[in-house]
Image (cartoon, rainbow, N blue to C red):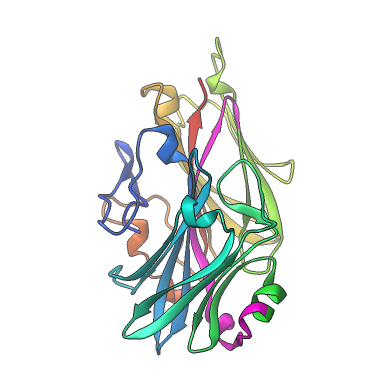
Amino acid sequence: MKDFPSCFTENGVQVADASASCTSVSKTKGSQNLVTCVYQTKFVGKSRLIIVTWSKNLVGHCFSVEIEDLSHKCLGRVDVKPSIFSKRKGSKSTEVDFVKIDVYWDLTNARFGSNPEPVEGFYVGLVCKGEVVLLIGDLRKEMLKNTKCLTRSLTNSMCLLKREHVFGKNVFGTKVQFKDNGQIHDVRIECDALGVGVDDPRLVVRVDSKMVMQVKHLVWKFRGNCTILVDGLPVEVYWDVHNWLFGSSTGSAVFMFQTCSGVEKHGAFAADRSISSWPYSQSSSFCLTLYAWKNE
């Protein structure tokens, strides 16, 4: 969790030191091919953070499930690596506070897009004392049928953060659900500053093909924030494209989409306000962080 982007500062977006329990951001393209989602749920009488990291290598897709307390102390971890993942269906266990936690998955018919996270046809579920405390994917009925578990605790779970690396020349896209059980939106970031001979570059953000944000004179406004509306919900958009315009050719731009419902809006990130220290239990806000890398 501690390798999430730390803040917007005078020197651009910084990355906090990675903890031993989490995957650090690497400059190599192979390790950039990660999608990390952070969920909050409650079991054994306490709120927990569940970090699910999807990755892809030459062998195939794999994922890890890490359980932390709200102070980001690792309580348990399950890794599903390619050698096991070839079965595409199975279960593994870990212990949290001396209580067995089972992780079930089925990716037999999973469909993948451009990133390592499945798009549909899958499930990953966490079960504690016969109850499903977290269920990811669209095959909910199949998960409950295969495990014969209850879902009473699912109302306590929510997705808080998602971090993704995207690649492109001038256009960078992803799909995102800004609120639980909400519509899945197509988000596209377009920047003509990456073209040759562009004197006055601009930045455009589209949601479902509709332009929701435009930044002109990007050389002077390479870092900033503004509010857009998605499904009537205010979403604060932060951008930092300094590396695209003035940095090395291997640097990434960083974009953050933070829902504003129930949280205090910040005009900018303070140097000591890391994402991993935000008060998760205070609201149902959601944050998407995109690292946008230029394809050479």
When the figure is inspected, residue 12 is found, relative to residue 5, above or below; the finding is: above
Q: Is residue 168 magenta?
A: yes
| Residue pictured at 62% horizontal, 68% vertical | 180
Front residue of 89/133: it is 89
Q: Which residues are magenta?
A: 146-171
Above/below status of 17 relative to 205:
below
Name which quarter of the figure residue 120 lies in: bottom right
Nearer to us in this view, 271 or 59? 59
- Residue 164, horizontal then vertical, whole percent: 50, 47
Quarter placement of the N terminus = bottom left
Residue 98 appearing in the image? yes
Q: Is residue 191 above or below residue 179?
A: above
**Is residue 284 at all visible to an observer of this figure?**
no
Occupied quadrant, residue 66:
bottom left
| Relative image position of residue 110 (x, y in whole percent) | 67, 55
Pick out the residue farthest to the top: 197
Give the x, y percent position of residue 63.
48, 56
The residue positioned 54% from the left and 22% from the top of the image is: 193
Along the line of sight, which residue is nearer the eye, 30 or 81?
81
Question: Residue 55 location, x and y as percent?
Answer: 48, 48
Residue in the picture at 25% in, 49% down: 17
The reply to whether the magenta stretch includes residue 160 is yes
Look at the picture and state if 103 lies above or below 275.
Answer: below
